[in-house]
């Protein structure tokens, strides 16, 4: 009888964990949909949540405005390109394979 109660408690715990996981994923999806609508990209099939839960644009990491990440990416890219004497065009080509943000090309050039 105790083994059956223990198994029942374990199943309930696992069900609660799954419910929590599903609820969290639905909340993330809802926030993602709200963001898409807010920035005017509804209907765009190019945005998605990657397997890591990060927002992607055409399989590239989306870098939002206002954060330090964009500045850090540009700082690192400039340091790397200057050491190899690459131009802005090549730096843009390299960065666009991994990242995306609005007016990225303009900002790098």
Image (cartoon, rainbow, N blue to C red):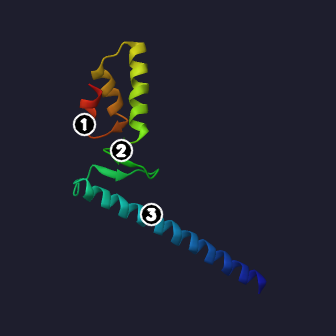
Q: Is residue 15 left or right of residue 55?
A: right
Towards the viewer: 2 or 20: 20
Going 28% across and 30% down the picture, which residue do you hit? 107
Q: Is residue 58 above or below residue 39?
A: above
**Numbered disc 1: secondary structure:** loop
- Provide residue 75's location: percent of width, then percent of height: 41, 26
Q: Nearer the viewer, mark 3 or mark 1?
A: 1
Residue 70 against residue 12 in the figure, above or below: above
Q: Kindly identify the residue that appears in the image at 43 percent across and 14 percent down.
A: 83
**Label 3: few (<14), some (14–19) or many (≥20) C-alpha neighbours in 10 Å:** few
Distance between the alpha carbons at the discs numbered 1 and 2: 11 Å
Quadrant for residue 11, please give it.
Answer: bottom right
- Please identify, in this view, whether the residue under mark 2 or under mark 3 is nearer the observer: 2
Relative to 69, 38 lies left or right: left
Q: Position of residue 85 (x, y in %)?
A: 36, 12
Can you identify the residue that label 1 sits on?
Answer: 103
Give the residue pinned by disc 2: 64
- Where in the figure is residue 87, as x and y percent of width and height? 30, 17
Compare marks 2 and 3 and give the one earlier in the sequence: 3
Q: Which residue is mark 3?
A: 25
Q: CA distance from mark 2 to mark 3?
A: 21 Å
Name the residue located 52 percent from the left edge and 69 percent from the top edge. Answer: 20
Farthest residue toward the bottom?
1
Of labels 3 and 1, earlier in sequence is 3
- Quadrant in which the N terminus appears: bottom right
User: Which residue occupies the extreme front position in the image?
Assistant: 66
């Amino acid at each position: 009888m105790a083994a059956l109660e223990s198994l029942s408690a374990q199943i309930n715990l696992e069900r609660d964990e799954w419910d929590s996981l599903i609820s969290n994923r639905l909340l993330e999806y809802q926030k993602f949909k709200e963001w898409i609508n807010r920035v005017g990209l509804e209907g765009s099939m190019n945005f998605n949540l990657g397997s890591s839960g990060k927002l992607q644009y055409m399989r590239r990491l989306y870098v939002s405005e206002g954060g330090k990440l964009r500045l850090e990416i540009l700082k690192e890219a400039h340091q790397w390109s200057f050491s190899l004497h690459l131009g802005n065009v090549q730096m843009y080509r390299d960065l666009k394979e991994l990242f995306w943000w609005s007016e990225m090309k303009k900002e790098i050039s």
